[in-house]
Image: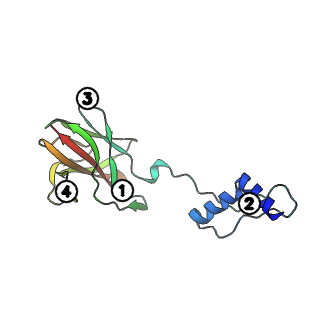
Amino acid sequence: MVHRVVRRSVRTGSVRVMVACLALAGCATPAPTAPPGTAEPIPAATARVPATPSPSDRPPDATLAAEGGDPVAAQLGTYTWGESGADSPWLPGSRISVGRGEPLAIAFDRPIGIARWTADYVPAFATDGSGAASLGRGGGPPLFPAPAAGSWTLVVTVRFAGDAGEARYFWRLEVF
């Protein structure tokens, strides 16, 4: 009889809710189970299902585009956002081909104020930002020229307005 109740619980999802609570919310109280001989489990009045993270739980996604070109999404590196953050190693970046000196612009997937930004680049084979050269810095939307011909890792560090946080975005520039 217990075997049948457990199978019904799996079908209704209460076991999955209990596992999600224990794993994600730190819930120590298991959901009630059905008494022997009943068809359905008793609903768990105290079970908490964690909310789905919203896009505002992390920095906005960024794209880089050369004038008239298709935008390319960045790889998001280290960031702080609200009361959370993530520490990331140096990333190779998403590949984009651009012309030497061509204006490059960064756009974000949601409207957000920018306090300041820096755009730096290193040779593509570099494993960190040591010896980075600057392409620009400022406030407002990031806009700067592409570097000389070559293969580069571009890292743009953005400090968002209102102390919302800071994020590093990476691209692999193939400049011709």
- The residue carrying mark 3 is 68
- The residue carrying mark 1 is 165
Q: Amino acid at mark 4?
A: Ala
Q: Amino acid at mark 3?
A: Gly
Q: Quadrant of residue 21?
A: bottom right
Circle 3: element type = loop
23 vs 131, left or right, is right
The circle drawn on residue 143 is none
**Residue at 59% across, 57% down:** 50
**Residue at 66% across, 62% down:** 18
Q: Amino acid at mark 1?
A: Gly
Mark 2 is surrounded, within 10 Å at the Cα level, by few (under 14), some (14 to 19) or many (20 or more) other residues, namely few
Residue 134 coordinates in the image, percent (x, y): 15, 51
Residue 7 coordinates in the image, percent (x, y): 75, 57
**Residue at 63% across, 62% down:** 19
> In this orientation, which residue lies closer to the viewer: 153 or 61?
153
Asked if the residues shown at circle 1 and circle 4 are in contact, with their CB atoms under 8 angstroms apart, the answer is no
Say which label, 1 or 3, has the lower sequence index.
Answer: 3
The circle drawn on residue 45 is 2
Q: Nearer the viewer, mark 3 or mark 2?
A: 3
